[in-house]
Amino acid sequence: MPSLTLVDRLLEVADTLRESLPQSAAFRRRAVSTAYYAVFHSLAKLCCETLLPNTMRSDDAWQRVYRALDHGSLRRVLQQSPLRSHPVLGVIGPLVIRLQEERHRADYLPPQRDLYSPEEVTDLLGQARYVISELNKLDIGGRKLLATSLLFKERNP
């Protein structure tokens, strides 16, 4: 059995939080935030594997590409062409954006006992899993399109 990746572990942590104390608003909030970070790390890994396919993770170039993914521009890029019109990325883009929005709510809103119901948390974790699954199935053309769109600023002629 292959070892679990960071993304796998983050999803496992989110599940553990959701299941271990479902009545806890804090655990539900952390589960939602962790689900988004699983997606974010999946995107960062995809960028590295696509742009630097034969590079060790300890290499400076790998680390620079991994760290280049920006939360702020992620939303904007996913809402624009060519990603918005791609058959797969156009479907998962809005899900990533929603997960990011929910992560912001989970991390920054003042305490609210009913911010997320257990069912909402389960739904958001399912969306994160779906996004990660679709990212893993992307063909090389889709991976290159996604990686270059996320990491490189579009310049007008």
Image (cartoon, rainbow, N blue to C red):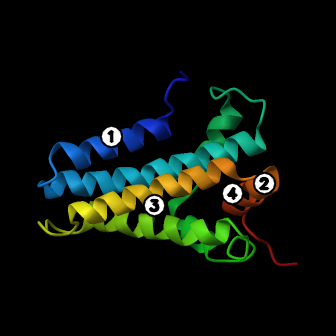
Q: CA distance from mark 3 to mark 1?
A: 16 Å
The earlier-in-sequence mark between 4 and 3 is 3
The image shows residue 96 at horizontal and vertical percentages of 51, 64
Between circles 4 and 3, the one closer to the viewer is: 3
Q: Is residue 130 left or right of residue 122?
A: right
Q: Is residue 126 left or right of residue 50?
A: left
Q: Which residue is mark 2?
A: 144
Q: Secondary structure at mark 3?
A: helix
Real-space CA distance between mark 2 and mark 1, rounded to the nearest whole angstrom:
30 Å
Task: Work out whether residue 15 or residue 35 is closer to the camera in this orientation and state it.
Answer: 15
C-alpha span from label 3 to label 2: 23 Å
Is 85 drawn above or below residue 145 in the view shown? below
- Residue carrying label 4: 151
What amino acid is labelled 2 in the image?
Answer: Lys
Element carrying mark 4: helix
Residue type at mark 4 is Leu
**Residue 132 in the image: x percent, y percent?**
55, 51
Q: Please tell me whether mark 1 or mark 4 is closer to you in this view.
A: 1
Q: Residues within 10 Å of mark 2 (few under 14, many from 20)?
A: some
- Residue type pointed to by label 1: Val
Residue 42 higher or lower than 78, as above or below? above
Mark 1 lies on residue: 13
Marked residue nearer the N-terminal end (3 or 1): 1
Q: Nearer the viewer, mark 2 or mark 1?
A: 1
Residue under label 3:
127
Q: Residues within 10 Å of mark 1 (few under 14, many from 20)?
A: some
Q: Nearer the viewer, residue 113 or 109?
A: 113
Does the CB distance between marks 1 and 4 fall below 8 Å?
no
